[in-house]
Image (tube, rainbow, N blue to C red):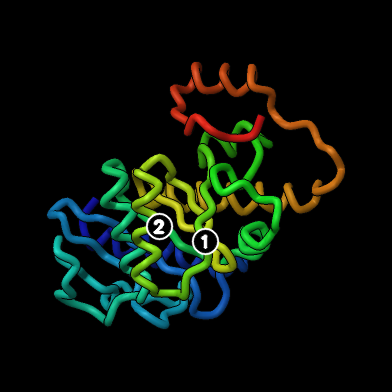
């Protein structure tokens, strides 16, 4: 995919996320790693619903701005995922309502923020880690992400929102949407003792589809 096309895709998918209420105002950011080692990222204080392809921030492999507007302050967050997940080519960070709500619940396991509710959640997201609250833009959040050692493509930032990596931008967007819908399911079913996928069902899914899940999780 050419850089021009990547720019158009960031704007198209950003607008789709915004128009469906998945990240309000000027919240959320998207990045895509390019073939030359540099990357494109949405600018600071930019609404995902009104992005200009020509004004996206272009960073070189060292993270230095080479063209476009000033980048989002969440660059350290994106960088940490790229550094720890070699397969990652895109990162999406939103302030989606149900995922943020999930991140604030006291019973959430930081190693598996959601139980194995559906096959598609495991297929798209694997398991989701929860990292503690950090001020938005705090470089320390990068250390928290690096501490996960690349085991998770899907991460919840406490009291903030999800950040998800994918091997394509579309895959990252779809996984973020699946995380949001699963968080919504969890909140709808909370306290109702729902049936989750059994260890046998998870093992079958993993074997059939070649999923690699972190060893720890819900029993």
Identity of the residue drawn at 47% across and 33% down? 214
- Residue, disc 2: 144
Q: Is residue 62 above or below residue 113?
A: below
Q: Quadrant of residue 85?
A: top left
Asked if labels 2 and 1 touch by Cβ distance under 8 angstroms, the answer is yes
Q: Most extreme residue toward the right, as rendered? A: 192
Number of marks in the rendered image: 2
Q: Residue 180: where, in percent of width, then height?
A: 61, 54
- Residue, disc 1: 132
Q: Is residue 70 above or below residue 163?
A: below
| Quadrant of the drawing holding the C terminus | top right
Compare residues 1 and 47 and report the one nearer the observer.
47
Q: Quadrant of residue 19?
A: bottom right
Q: Quadrant of residue 76?
A: bottom left
Q: Residue 62: where, in percent of width, then height?
A: 14, 64
Point out which mark residue 25 bears. none
Q: Is residue 114 above or below residue 7?
A: above
Q: From this viewpoint, is residue 57 visible?
A: yes
Q: Secondary structure at mark 1?
A: loop
Q: Residue 131: where, in percent of width, then height?
A: 50, 57
Q: From this viewpoint, is residue 17 visible?
A: no
Is residue 128 rendered to the left or right of residue 83? Answer: right
Q: Residue 67: where, in percent of width, then height?
A: 17, 77
Instruction: State which tag comes first along the sequence, 1 or 2.
Output: 1
Identity of the residue drawn at 39% across and 74% down? 137
């Amino acid at each position: 995919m050419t850089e021009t096309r990547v720019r158009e895709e960031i704007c198209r998918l950003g607008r789709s996320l915004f128009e469906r209420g998945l990240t309000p105002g000027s919240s959320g950011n998207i990045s895509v790693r390019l073939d030359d080692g540099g990357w494109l990222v949405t600018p600071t204080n930019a609404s995902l619903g009104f992005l200009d392809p020509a004004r996206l921030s272009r960073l070189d492999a060292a993270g230095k701005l080479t063209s476009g507007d000033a980048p989002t302050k969440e660059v350290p967050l994106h960088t940490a995922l790229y550094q720890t997940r070699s397969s990652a080519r895109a990162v999406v960070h939103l302030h989606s309502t149900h995922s943020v709500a999930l991140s604030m619940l006291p019973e959430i396991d930081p190693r598996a923020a959601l139980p194995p509710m559906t096959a598609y959640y495991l297929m798209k997201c694997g398991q989701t880690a929860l990292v503690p609250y950090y001020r938005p833009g705090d470089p320390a959040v990068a250390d928290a992400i690096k501490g996960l050692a690349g085991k998770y493509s899907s991460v919840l930032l406490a009291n903030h929102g999800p950040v998800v990596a994918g091997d394509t931008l579309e895959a990252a967007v779809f996984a973020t949407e699946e995380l949001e819908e699963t968080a919504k399911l969890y909140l709808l079913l909370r306290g109702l003792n729902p049936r989750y996928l059994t260890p046998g069902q998870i093992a079958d899914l993993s074997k059939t589809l070649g999923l690699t899940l972190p060893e720890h999780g819900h029993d």
